[in-house]
Amino acid sequence: MNWLPQVSPLTVVLIPFIGAALIGLAARSWKTQQLISWTTSALFLLAVLGQLGAVLAGETPRQLVWEILPGLPIAFSIEPLGMIFALLASSLWIVATPYAIGYMVNGGYTSLARFFACYAIALGAAAGIAFADNLLTMFIFYEILSVSTYPLVAHTGTAKARQGARTYLGILLLTSICFWLPAMIWTFIATGTLEFAQGGILAGHLGPTQAGLLLLLFMFGTGKAALMPFHRWLPSAMVAPTPVSALLHAVAVVKAGVFVALKLALYVFGLDFLAEIPLTDFVLYVATFTMIAASLIAIHQDNLKARLAYSTVSQLAYIVVGALLATQVAAIGGGMHMVMHGYGKITLFFCAGAIYLASHKTLVSELDGIGRRMPFTMAAFLLGALCVIGIPPMGGLWSKWHLVTGAFEAGHAVVLAAFLLSTLLNIAYLLPPVLRAFLKPLPEGEPATLKEAPLMCVVPLTLTAAGSMVLFFAAGLPHRLMQLVFA
Amino acid sequence: MAIVDLMPFSVLAPLIASGVVALLPGRFWPWAITLLAAIVATVIAALTLPAALESTLSYPFGNWPPPIGIEYRVDAANAFVALLVAGMAALSLPWAKVSIDREVPERQGAFYALFLLALAGLLGITLTGDAFNVFVFLEISSLATYALIAHGRDRRALLASFRYLIMGTIGATFLLIGIALLYMMTGTLNMADLAVRLPEVQHTRTVDAALAFIVVGMGLKLAMLPLHLWLPNAYAYAPNFVTIFLAGTATKVALYVMVRFIFTVFGGEYSFTVLPLAIVLMALGVAGMFAGSWVAMFQDHLKRMLAYSSVAQVGYMVLGVSLFSAAGLTAAFLHMFNHALIKVALFMAVGTIMYRIGSIKLQDIRGLGRQMPWTLTAFALAGLSIIGVPTTAGFISKWYLILAAAEAGHWWLVGLIVITSMMAVYYIWRVIEAAWMQERPAGSPAVREAPLALLAPTWLMVALNFYFGIDTRLTVGASTAAAEALLGVGGLMP
Amino acid sequence: MTVLGFFNYWVVIILMMIGLYCVIARGNMIKKIIGLNLFQTSVFILFISAGKVVGGSTPILREGVEVYSNPLPHVLILTAIVVGVAITAVGLALAVRIQEAYGTIEDDHLGDDGEDDGPFEEEQRG
C-alpha cells in the first residue's frame, strides 16, 4: 500500500466530520450533497487504506492530539484490531453510500442533508473509536456515535420512530454513563492511566474479585455490544430507514460495541489476567445465553428486519464470547467475525430494504415466491445468510472455525455446544425467507415479472454479497492483522 | 504602576462608573460605560491573577498599615474568584443590550448603575482582607441585587425580590453577628490578623458560635440546600440579564466567603473539629445535589428548572469543600468557575428564546428547534457541559470532584455524583425533546432565529465551555493554587 | 450576679428573638420589615456593647481622662445602621410596589403565587 500517502490518524478521523460540515453547508443543493458524500467516503477509504501498509509492517502510528488533564490525553494510535474495524467501516461505507442515496430518494424521504451529515459523523465517530489510544478518547467518540445516530433512527419523525429512538439513545447513553464512565474512573484511580497497552494495564493493580466487578461494569456498560439484558435498543432502532439499520446497526454501531469489548479484553484486562478473574465465566455465560436466547427469539419474528436485528444480537454475542474465552484463537475468531458478520449482515439488511422498496413487504410470511420477481436480491440474501451461518464458500466459516477451536482449547464444553446449537438455529431463522422466496408460489394476483429495486440499491447488495464470498478466499488479511495483535 | 496599586481600581472602576451612569440619559451610553467599566475590572483582575499566584498581594488603604487600616489582600483564591466575577460581567454585558432594551425600556441609566453597584460589591467582597468590609460590600451588592430583581417584567419578580431581601438580610446579619463575636474575642477585624490571634482564644464558646453564625449566614446567601428557598423565584422572574449575572457570580462569591472564613480565618483544622462540618456540609451538599436535580426534572418553566439545577450545582461545590482536602477544594473552585460558564451559557440561550417567543414554558417551545436552530443547539451543547460529558468544562470539574471523593475513600459519593449527572441528562433531555422531537402547536406564529446580538455572546459562552473542557491549564492551575492558598500550603496562613 | 452582669446580652437575645419571630410569623410585609429592623438593631447593640470599657469615658482626647471606651464599634455600627436604613427603604419601596401590583401586602393573601399566573403580567404593572 505504499502508493497511498499515509496521513496522520487525526486526519483520517476528521475526514468524515469535515464532510458532514460541508453537507450541512450545502443544505440547499442536493447534487452537491451527493457529490460530497461520495468524495468523503472515497477519501475516507483511501486514508484508511493508506495506514494498512504501516500496520502490516508491524508499526503502530501514534498521535497525541491534546492533553486535557495530566494522564487524560486525546490520542490516537493505529493498531491491528482497530485497523480491522476501520477497514470494515470504510469499505462498507462506500458501498452503502449509493444504497442510501437510492433508498432515501426512491423511498420519498425528506431532510436528506441532515441524514447524510449525521451518517458521515457516525462514520467519523466509528473511526475515532477504532483509532482511540485510550479509554477517554474512545468514550468521547462512543458518545458522539450514540448521539449522532439518534436523528437517523428518528428520521421519519413519527411517534413510533421517536419512541424507538428514545429507547435506543436511552439505553446507550444510560449504560455508558452509568457503567462505563465509573468503570473508566475506577481504572484510572487503580492504575493511574487509561492508555491501551498490549497485554493489559490492570494486572497487578486490582485483585481478581475487584477486577471481576470492573469487568461487569465495562461489559454491561458497552451497551452497543447488546449483551442481554441491554439488547432492547437494537430491535427498537429498526424503526430507522433501512440504510441506517444496514450500515449503522449491522456494522458501525454494533461493531463499535464488540470492538470495544475486544479492545477491553485484549488491551485493558489482557487475556492472561482475564483468565484469572472468576467473574469472567459469569459474563461469558451471559453472552452464551444471549447467543442462544436471541436466536430463539429471532425464529419467532415475522418482521424481517426484527428477525435480522435479533440475529445481530446473537452474532454480537459470538464476538463477546470470543473475547471472554481468553484464548488467542478465540480472540482471533472474534476479530474475524466482526468482518465476516459485517459483510454478511449488511447484505441481508440491504436485501430487506430492497424488498421493501420494490414491493412494500416487511414480513417474512409475505415473501412467498418473491424470488421470481427479485432474483438478484434473493440470491444475495442467500449468500449473506450462508455467510452469517458460516457455510463454505463464505467468509463466515473461518471466524466460526476459530471461535469453536477457541472454545475447545479453553475447555468450555457448554460454550462449544452453544456454538453448534446456535449455528443450527441460524439456519432455522435465516433460510426460511429464502426457501419461501424461491420454492413457494407467488400469491394470487401478483405477476411473476421481474421487479427489482432501483439499480442504486441492487448493485451495492450484489457487491457486498460478492464481498462476503471473496472473504472466504481472502480471510488471510484479517487473520494476519489479528495475529499482529499478539505479535 | 505596580499591579498592587492597580488592584483597588477593579472595585473603584464600577463604583465610579455607577455614579456616572446613573446620570446618563438614553439607552446607548449607560450600557457602553457599564461595559467599559466591566472590561477595566476584568483586565485588572486578569493582570492580578498571575501576580497573586506567585505571592500574596496587599494594598493598604490610605497607607495605614494593616491590621490598623483596611487592606485589600489578594492571593490565588480571591484573584481567581475576582477574575470570574469581572469576566462574567464583561461577557454577559454584550448580550444584555438588546435584551434590556426590551425588558427595561425606561430609565436604563438607573438600571445599569445598580448593576455596576452589584458588580463593585461582589468584587469588593472578593478582594478585601477586612471582615467588616466583607459585610459592607455584601450588603451593597445585595441591595443592588434586590432592586435589579424587582425590575423583572413579571409582577412576581417583586415578591421574589422581597423574599430574597428578607432572607438575604438575615443571612448578612448572621455574618455580622459572627464578625462581632470574633471582634469581641480578638479586637481585630483584619482577616489575616484574625487568623493569627484566633488560636489563642480557640475553643471558647464564643468562637464556636461565631463560626456557626458565619457558616449559616453564608449558607443562606449561597443557597445551600435547606436555605435555598429564595433562589428559584429570584432567578425565574428577574430580568434575563440579571439572572445570567447572578447565576454566574453571586452564589460563587458567597461560597468563597464561606470557604475563606472556614479555612483562612478559623483554620480548617479547627473548623472541622469544632463543628461536624465534614458530615454536615457533605450531607447538605449531597442533599442539595439530589433535591435540586430532582425538582429540576419536573419544572416546566425553563428558568426555574435551571435555577433548581443551580441549587444542585452548589451542592457539588459544597461537597467538594466538605472533603477538607486539597483535591476537594480544587474541585470546588473548578466547579465554581466551570458552573459559571455553563449556567451563563444556558441562561443566555433561555433568555434568547424568551426574547423571541415571550415565554419559556416547556409546552411553548415545542418544535422550536427547527425555527431557532442556533439558539437551541447552543442550549443543547451547554447542556452537555452541565451533564459533564468529556471535552466540556463540566466534565473537568466533576472529574476532579470524583477523584477527590475517591481519594477520601468515599466510593459511594462517586456513585451519587454519577446518578445526579444522570438526572441532569433527564432535565436537559426534556428540553431537547420538546424542541426537536415535537411539532409546533398548530396556530402558533412563525418565529425567526434570534438576532446576532444575542446569538454571538451565547455562542461565545458555549465555545468557552468547550475551550475550558480541553485546555485546562488556566482553570486547573488557578484552582489548585487557590486550594493551596486556603489550606495554608503557601499563602495567607502564617 | 453573673446573670445580671450579662444583662446587655439578655437584651440582645430578647430583641433578636422578637425580631426573628416577627419576620417568620407575620404575614404582613410591613411587620416583616419591622421585625427585620429589630433583629438588626439587636446585633448593633451587641456590637456596640462590646466597645464599652468599665469606667471609660467618651473617646475624645482631653485632659484628665485615662480610660476611653473603644470607638471602633461605634464607627462600624454607624455604617451598619446606614446599611440597615437602606434595606428598610428598599423593603418598603418593594412593599409599595407589591401593593400596587397585587392590591395587598399580606403574604397569606398572596399565597404561594404558584406558576399558573400566566406568562406575563406586564400590563398590570403599567
Image (cartoon, rainbow, N blue to C red):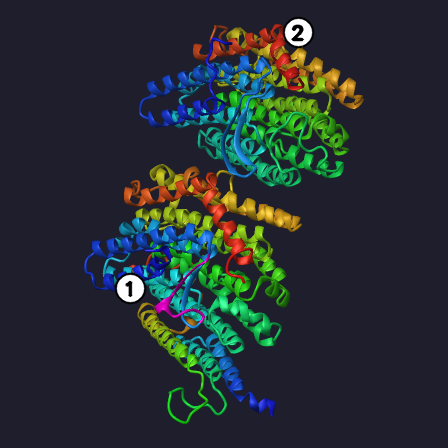
Q: Disc 2 is attached to a residue of which chain? A: A
Q: Nearer the viewer, mark 1 or mark 2?
A: 2
Name the spot of residue A119 as percent of width and height, x first. Answer: 45, 25
- Find numbered disc 2 in the image and state the secondary structure of the residue it sits on: loop
Q: Residues within 10 Å of mark 1 (few under 14, many from 20)?
A: few
B61 falls in the magenta region: yes
Residue for badge 1: C125
> Viewed as shown, does residue A365 lie left or right of A291?
left
Using the rendered image, report if marks 1 and 2 lie on a common chain: no
Name the spot of residue A14 as percent of width and height, x first. Answer: 44, 25
Look at the image and give the residue range highlighted in magenta.
B56-67
Q: Residues within 10 Å of mark 2 (few under 14, many from 20)?
A: few
Q: Nearer the viewer, residue B385 or A397?
A: B385
The reply to whether discs 1 and 2 touch (Cβ–Cβ < 8 Å) is no
Name the spot of residue A329 as percent of width and height, x first. Answer: 71, 17
Residue for badge 2: A392
- Find numbered disc 1 in the image and state the secondary structure of the residue it sits on: helix
Q: Nearer the viewer, residue A381 or B114?
A: B114
Outermost residue to the front: C63
B147 falls in the magenta region: no
Looking at the picture, which amino acid does disc 1 mark? Arg
Name the spot of residue B465 as percent of width and height, x first. Answer: 43, 43
Q: Disc 1 is attached to a residue of which chain? A: C
Q: Is residue A10 above or below residue B262?
A: above
